[in-house]
Amino acid sequence: MKALVWENNKIELKQRDYPRIIHPRDAIVKVKLSSICTSDLHIIKGFVPNAKPGIVLGHEFVGEIVELGSNIKNLQIGDRVSANCETFCGECYFCKKGYINNCENGGWELGCTIDGCQAEFVRVPYADMGLTKIPSNISYENALFVGDILASGYFGIELCNLQKDDAIAIIGAGPVGLCSMACAKNFSPSKIIAIDINDARLKKAKELNLADYTFNPRKCDIEKEIKNLTPNRGADCIVEAAGNEDSFQMAWKIARANANIAIVAMYEKDQILPLPKMYGKNLVFKTGGVDGIHSKELLDMISKGAINTDFLITQKYPLDNIIKAYDFFENNKNDCLKVAITY
Ligand SMILES: NC(=O)c1ccc[n+]([C@@H]2O[C@H](COP(=O)([O-])OP(=O)(O)OC[C@H]3O[C@@H](n4cnc5c(N)ncnc54)[C@H](O)[C@@H]3O)[C@@H](O)[C@H]2O)c1
Ligand SMILES: [Zn+2]
Ligand SMILES: [Zn+2]
């Protein structure tokens, strides 16, 4: 089969053997659509120490089950499924608490330590946990982001504990930030404020009616604008989905006293918390790699029309052209949110 392999610091489309069941809780999935994630770029750039050279990349996909291990009772051959980006056993200390990102028997494996989904077929370990049936009224396209980007956006909303009538500010209107906005709508906030330095992305947030207000902090006094909207207090909830020094500092500056700040972004450097300046603001910071345990709820919300992430697919490329897709995804932030790889 064809597979995108990462080796010697570069990616190449190669011929690989079909994956096989090696454990009774495995499934083999025929990939129907996959995507490229910023984390894949992190691997290629050498920022992911765990990544194993020679693996097939990719962890965001949907597909059809073609083979099942003998211990899997909740899925059937032929099921259309969305896949979780993380592998988790469902039985260890952390899984039992819902903290699957820290599963003692899993973690980020697909496309990192074991072969991933940017191939025609993929083996999914603990498939009874990591695969979720797609409701019959929604398409593969509708479900593509459930296991990674949408889960991360939803996770941000959970972390900042968004309540009805809260004013939420979301820093970064990339795929994750936009998904947080789409999820936030379901919690009836008083206002959703999108902040980005990229005007094209802000325009998208506004056009899609995902945000009530949009601001480019390079073109305004962002603290002042947020205070104007939140009678001089600051935002109740903040999701930081941009991931650099400026956005990290902005997160606490635009927060009202006692606000919740969800740090969903992944930084390439250490960040500084200026505690003396923040003293008395009594902020709650929560950080996290996504605990993607809500796939079923998210699929149900998509099925009912409460969330729609179709707008994220801005380009499609067949697997044969995946190298071009990587290049476009990395270098065209104005025009590209996510690429879908077709099969
Ligand atoms: N926690 C998790 O499990 C998880 C999962 C997926 C992605 N992530 C991380 O979430 C972050 C967002 O992912 P993405 O795919 O949306 O990335 P992205 O790079 O497409 O989007 C980030 C956005 O932030 C904007 N930005 C940059 N600096 C800014 C600033 N100073 N102020 C305001 N906006 C600014 C950029 O213009 C861009 O639109 C990344 O750091 C990614 O690694 C985390
Ligand atoms: Zn990812
Ligand atoms: Zn576990």
Image (tube, rainbow, N blue to C red):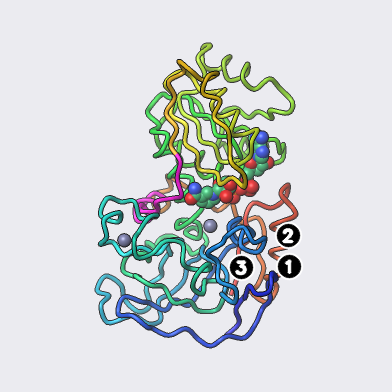
Mark 2 Cβ and ligand 1 under 8 Å apart: no
Q: Residue furthest top?
A: 232
Amino acid found under the numbered disc labelled 3: Ile
- Point 27% across, 50% down: residue: 97
Q: Residue furthest front?
A: 276
Instruction: Give yes or no for residue 294 being in the magenta stretch.
Output: yes
Q: Secondary structure at mark 1?
A: helix
Amino acid found under the numbered disc labelled 2: Phe
Amino acid found under the numbered disc labelled 1: Lys
Residue 33 at x, y percent in the picture: 54, 68
The answer to whether the residue labelled 1 contacts the one labelled 2, judged by CB atoms less than 8 Å apart, is yes
Magenta residues span 287-301
* Foreground residue among 263 and 302: 263
Q: Would you call the spot at circle 2 few (<14 residues within 10 Å), some (14-19), or many (20 or more)?
A: some
Q: Which mark is residue 303?
A: none
- Point 58% across, 37% down: residue: 271
Report the residue marked by disc 2: 328
Q: Would you call the spot at circle 1 few (<14 residues within 10 Å), some (14-19), or many (20 or more)?
A: few
Report the residue marked by disc 3: 341
Report the residue marked by disc 1: 324
Instruction: Give yes or no for residue 5 being in the magenta stretch.
Output: no
The answer to whether the residue labelled 3 contacts the one labelled 2, judged by CB atoms less than 8 Å apart, is no
The quarter of the image that holds ligand 1 is: top right
